[in-house]
Image (spheres, rainbow, N blue to C red):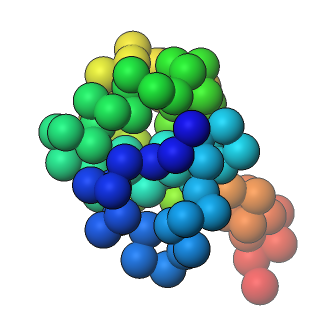
Amino acid sequence: MKLPASLKKYFWNADFSRLSPAGDATVITERLLEFGDPAAIRWLLKNIPQYTVREVVKRRRALSPRSRFFWAAYFHIPRSQIVCLKKSSLQRRKTLWPY
């Protein structure tokens, strides 16, 4: 299955003809959740499994905080499950060694 031509504008830095929903679901999901219009989001939710979309929201760092909070609320994902919202190891290290 190929991506519709209407999504080409979201993949300006990739070879659009080589992208496939089966092999590149994570990259496609990240890009569309961050930049997609309503038509792109409808395509995404119809063609990419919901568990894949939810895992991108939980684990991938490509989403901005604003997008991450929105999609976490949309999918009813608790903040405690979102890896990127947890305190980073560098911040924890500075409390032990302040240099």
Residue 90's image quarter? bottom right
Pinpoint residue 75: horizontal percent, then vertical percent.
39, 18
Give left or right: position of 13 versus 61.
Answer: left
**Residue 54 seen:** no
Q: Quadrant of residue 31?
A: bottom left
Outermost residue toward the bottom in this view: 99
Q: Is residue 51 above or below residue 90?
A: above
Query: 77 and 4: which one is in front?
Result: 4
Q: Position of residue 4 (x, y in %)?
A: 37, 48
* Residue 79 visible in the snapshot: yes
Q: Nearer the viewer, residue 22 or 98?
A: 22
Looking at this rendering, what residue extends furthest in the top direction?
76
Q: Position of residue 85 (x, y in %)?
A: 53, 44
Quadrant position of the N terminus in the picture: top right
Task: Work out which quarter of the rendered image holds the C terminus and state it.
Answer: bottom right
Q: Quadrant of residue 25?
A: top right
Residue drawn at 19 percent across, 39 percent down: 39
Residue farthest left in this picture: 38
